[in-house]
Amino acid sequence: MLGALLLAMLLPMWTAGQTVLALSLLLGLVQVLGVLYAAHAVMSVRSSRGAIAWSLSLILLPWVAIPLYWIFGRRRFHGYAELLYSAYLQHRQHVEAAFRTIAHYRVTLDSVLEPVQHLAETLNPLPWTTDNTTELLIDGAQTYNAMLQAIAAAQDYILLQMYILQDDDIGNQFRQTLIAKAQAGVRIYILYDGIGSHGLSKQYVQSLQRSGIAIGVFKSTRGQGNRFQINFRNHRKILIADGKVAIVGGLNIGDEYLGKHPPLSPWRDTALQLQGPAVQCVQCVFLGDWYWATRKVPDVSWQSPPIPTTTNPESVLIFPTGPADRLPACLLFFVHVINQAQSRLWIASPYFVPDEATLTALKLAALRGVDVRILLPDRPDHLLVYLCAFSYYNEMQSAGVKLYRYQAGFMHQKVILIDDRLGGIGSVNLDNRSFFLNFEMTVMIATAHGVQQIERMLVQDFQRAESVKLTTYNHRSWGFKLATRISRLLTPIL
């Protein structure tokens, strides 16, 4: 763009011959850049299909493809891991003390789940911990009530992280509650994603700051060489009060989660309330993101309060993933747990845009006799993603995978249930964006109480859903089928 602008300014000063020469040089330069970027795509793009698509576009349409490649071509988030390592070196004594506290609660799972534990702790520095309690929070009203109660009970500090924070009725209720706690002397740290919360008003943020609340914005473009790094998102949703209670899951803060935005009403979602050492693990995740945004480390508690003796202790894993990982940890972990399923694999996700590895794992699970069910919303909130899911119908159902569409509103929860042994709730959607481009977090539970909670909830959800028949897609118009296939071509960035 800069070259074109300079050329437009200089054109009146040049002769026709000089203009032709300048245009030829500029065109040649862009074409050379296209070839060089095509070579870079061949060497660095994750999939062969993606490498072919990028290289052809960069060579044939460099004027269009080069800017798009700057934005969408990166597969790794630069600077994050390196920055956290530098923070570790600066605060090594405190970090190691915190991890020693967490390690005291590490638990060894039974032999059936040993492969899952081994992989999880290889990909992730946080261990499975015991002495936790978990409580499902179903839908917006229950979740927000629990969050506001945790905020009201906080005595020392509050950590709040959202992908989307809305300046609406519920957003203002949170704002007023947080301001009141700040005025009472509680330290508050709020972090939101710069792209996900792009509509948040300055007045909203400034009112919080005037009350002494620290605000951080997670910007993927921060750091040297990251100007065009805008295809990444921090999709995590976290609330921590005093290091004692954490609430995580799929809900942002906005009126739509309370069913106030038809036609996506009522809104179906799930969060999880945690107590025990798993809260300190969640705290580690928040502090890493906060340090990226602010280059500061809040003073927090690492003492895990004992859980009530009458409660069965839960074995819990906090599993953060993201594009800064050395390996695609989110994809590897989910493919692995899918492969571990022996009798049942139930997944609820608002978006179904799996990569080839996940698709293969799901089909193999069904073919070996596992009850594989995937629960999707019947109403779209993102049209391209909604259309893309239809393109998988034939191959999934031919392998025995059962697809369901939730009928009682819009379903946004992200839940997985494996056999009778393992359940997960978090922010991960069954799509390429969650697996490769977003910072996400999943809570895995490996004890009977938590797994049974998830089972009862999903049974009710499937009762509110309709089984998808193969003819549902086959009887659609040719134009609809073409739209689904075109949408599928965009899976790397959906």
Image (cartoon, rainbow, N blue to C red):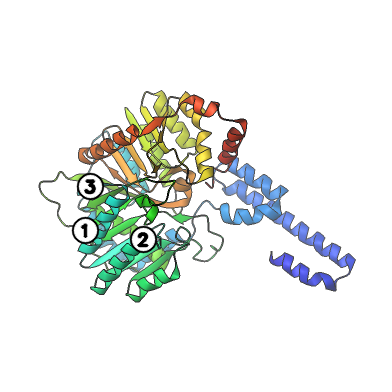
Residue to which mark 3 is pinned: 134
At numbered mark 1, what does the secondary structure look like: helix, strand or loop?
loop
- Between residues 237 and 7, which one lies in front from this camera angle? 237
- The amino acid beneath tag 3 is Thr
Which three-letter amino acid code belongs to the residue tagged 2?
A: Asp
Q: Residue 439, relative to residue 357: is it above or below?
A: below
**In front: label 1 or label 2:** 2
Q: CA distance from mark 3 to mark 1?
A: 13 Å
Secondary structure beneath disc 3?
Answer: strand
In the rendered structure, find residue 244 and report the number of the disc placed on it.
1
SS label for mark 2: helix
Q: How far separated are the C-alphas under marks 2 and 3?
A: 28 Å
Q: Residue furthest left?
A: 309
Question: In the figure, residue 91 lies in which quadrant?
Answer: bottom left
Q: Is residue 245 left or right of residue 213?
A: left
Q: Which dot marks residue 457?
A: none
Left-right relation of 197 to 117: right
Q: Is residue 190 above or below residue 440?
A: below
**Location of mark 2 (residue):** 169
